[in-house]
Amino acid sequence: MKKMILCSLMTLLFCGCGRDAAQLTVVTGIGVDGQAGEYQVGAEVIRLTEGGQDSQGGQSVYLRGTGITITDSINNMVSMTGRSLYCNHTQVIIVSRETAENGMDPILEELLRGTQYPISVRLAVSGETAAQTLRAKPVVSDLHSVELEDMIREGAKQCLTPDMDASSFYQQIAAPGIEGVLPFMVLEERDGEAVCSLDGTALFKGDRMLAVLDERDSRCLMWMQGKAGGSLVTEHAVFEVMDLEQSLSADKDGGKLSLKLVLKASDSEENREALIAEAENTLERRCRSLIKQLQKLECDAVGFGNRIYQKHPDQWAALEKDWPRRFADYPISVEVKVDNLIWGRIWSDGAQEGRYGS
């Protein structure tokens, strides 16, 4: 990934972008602490080195700056580097929990109104300061910001967390009847060093962070939103969620969430019906539990209100102003159906008992 970024930058440099490579410092990741008017911003950058077009290279460097805005903070870093920072290749922006709780509107406005940041830049919230998260040791990559972006993208494929870029997140929190979500990260110690890991989903109410869902509830929320991937663990089996069809109906009198799943299991076909029933019951219980949790928070992260807005605009006009409170008491039914069960490796009874218990 680092070589791909460097190659794309070299293409820009030698196709008339007009920048001197010796003066070009490319930002790959940004960490934001503090609040609007007094941001503390960290940046992971690639400092390009010269030696001819075929021998261009780069070195990862971490910089810190303060300012009224993110851009002001980054521009102020020139006092330390003597180089302008180029942000159009930023892979990820990490925002501290405290900053997210104070509100994301100023950050989103800055990211989306100009052209210096890609609108596809991925966003995430950190349980620690953004500076600590961005400066943590990468596990398998030379560039930590690239590794963080990979973690979010691949984690979303397993329904561990949402995958949200700046533009998509803005559209989500601006849409009627649905609340926003972002990946949530924490630092954990491995072999005496602090490394980053995904740790669930940050829930928002408007532009302000409200709470965090753990990994299991995050996966359930992703399924409730219609995303397939990851594993459903029941008492006697582990299922891979291969495909998922979501149906959401809602009006002023109540809503219904229906999920149809294609699962893959590593087991004997002798207990097919029992395993299907267990999978359906387990996921239905988890969905009901999570809906109760969201209703307690008055946070419609599934989008029942948005479905009323789309299908019943006249009813939504009467509900919109007070929807969070109404959602807290909104009757919701859940239906889960395993549409197909695919069998993988066939285990003996002894192997199955050893893995899942009796």
Image (cartoon, rainbow, N blue to C red):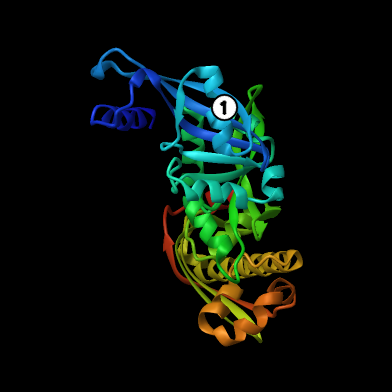
Residue 287 visible, this orientation: yes
Tell which of 163 and 104 is nearer to you.
104
Q: Residue at x 53, y 55 (%)?
A: 169
Dot 1: within a 10 Å radius of its alpha carbon, few (fewer than 14), some, or many (20 or more) residues? Answer: some
Image location of residue 102, percent across then percent down = 71, 49
Q: Quadrant of residue 258?
A: bottom right
Image location of residue 288, percent across then percent down = 67, 70
- Vertical order, 222 against 185 (above or below): below
Quadrant of image for the C terminus = bottom right
Amino acid type, mark 1? Asn
Q: Residue at x 49, y 50 (%)?
A: 112
> At numbered mark 1, what does the secondary structure look like: helix, strand or loop?
loop
Q: Residue at x 45, y 48 (%)?
A: 119
Quadrant of image for the N terminus = top left
Q: Which residue is mark 1?
A: 76
Image location of residue 207, percent across then percent down = 64, 56
Image location of residue 278, percent across then percent down = 60, 67
Residue 142 visible, this orientation: no
Q: Residue at x 56, y 63 (%)?
A: 174
